[in-house]
Amino acid sequence: MKTRVFLAILLLTVVAILYCSDDPSENTEYQRKTRELKALSDRFKAETGFEGTIENNPELMILSKFTGSFKDIDMKNVTDSLSTRIVFDDVLNKLLPFISAPKNQLEKYELRSSSGTTRIRYYQTVNGYSIEGLGFINIAYDKNRDLFTIMNVTVNVQQTTVTNIISEEAAFKIARTAFEQTEYCNELTPTWRSKTVIQYKSRQVNGKAQPYRLCWRVTFPGLSYYIDAETSEWFHEGYVINDL
């Protein structure tokens, strides 16, 4: 009996320590974001006639996935591609007040159909440049189930004029000079990287996402360097394997 009592007390102590170690402010912030997104999803349903489920992403503060239908949109008898595009544009217009990208940042991609499902992607571009890892909306219609599935990963990027962009060669030189000071650089490191791209990038500083900036990304084995295309300021991150 004493052993069981001791184990019970020990278990309660461990639970108390784990509970107290959580940052109350983080829990409160997460709960606030969840409440705001729940209110936004309720407003979306009320204003658009959407019937179905909505998932959200508190980290990005977006409504991220919609599965269902709209009371005033009928796709069952739509057969040609032109009419399908018009319907998808109607769906997009319903989304616009509730997503992070304005309509002038969304470019329509080609329609694709397979196994009773028709889908389209709207890419988010700013000043003609894409957004690293994010920045698009997928809309798919499943004819067999008569419902839409919508994926939203648009982000808030200010539509400001970008001037005096540094060249790819200048960005590479900055990255290469910095990379040569690391343990990753050796005689086998290539003198040029084919995966040098220019995109909008949001940097995490002390756990908080910073405003998006247009950056050159130069990837070497082990590190990706991001050079601000206007100011030449840079930082690096561990690369994703697919970047190479």
Image: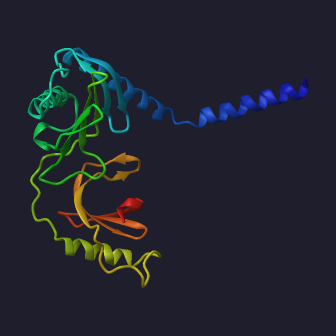
Residue 152: image location, x then y, percent: 27, 36
Q: Nearer the viewer, residue 88 or 66?
A: 88
* Direction from residue 162 to residue 41 in the image, left or right: right
Q: Quadrant of the N terminus?
A: top right
Q: Residue furthest right?
A: 1
Q: Nearer the viewer, residue 73 or 215?
A: 73
- 188 and 67: which is toward the camera: 67
> Residue at point 41% right, 32% down?
29
Say which quarter of the image contains residue 69: top left
Residue at 36% from the left image edge and 65% from the top image edge: 224
Front one among 37 and 69: 69
Q: Where's residue 169, x and y in %?
A: 20, 75
Is 228 placed left or right of 33 in the picture? left
* 112 vs 184: above or below: above
Q: Residue at x 14, y 30 (%)?
A: 84
* Vertical position of residue 171 compared to residue 19: above or below: below
Q: Identify the image quadrant of the C terminus.
A: bottom left
Q: How is the image coloured?
A: rainbow
At 24% from the left and 45% from the top, the residue drawn is 135
Residue 129 on image: x %, y %: 17, 54
How many tags in the picture? 0
- Residue at the extreme bottom: 187
Q: Position of residue 99 (x, y in %)?
A: 22, 33
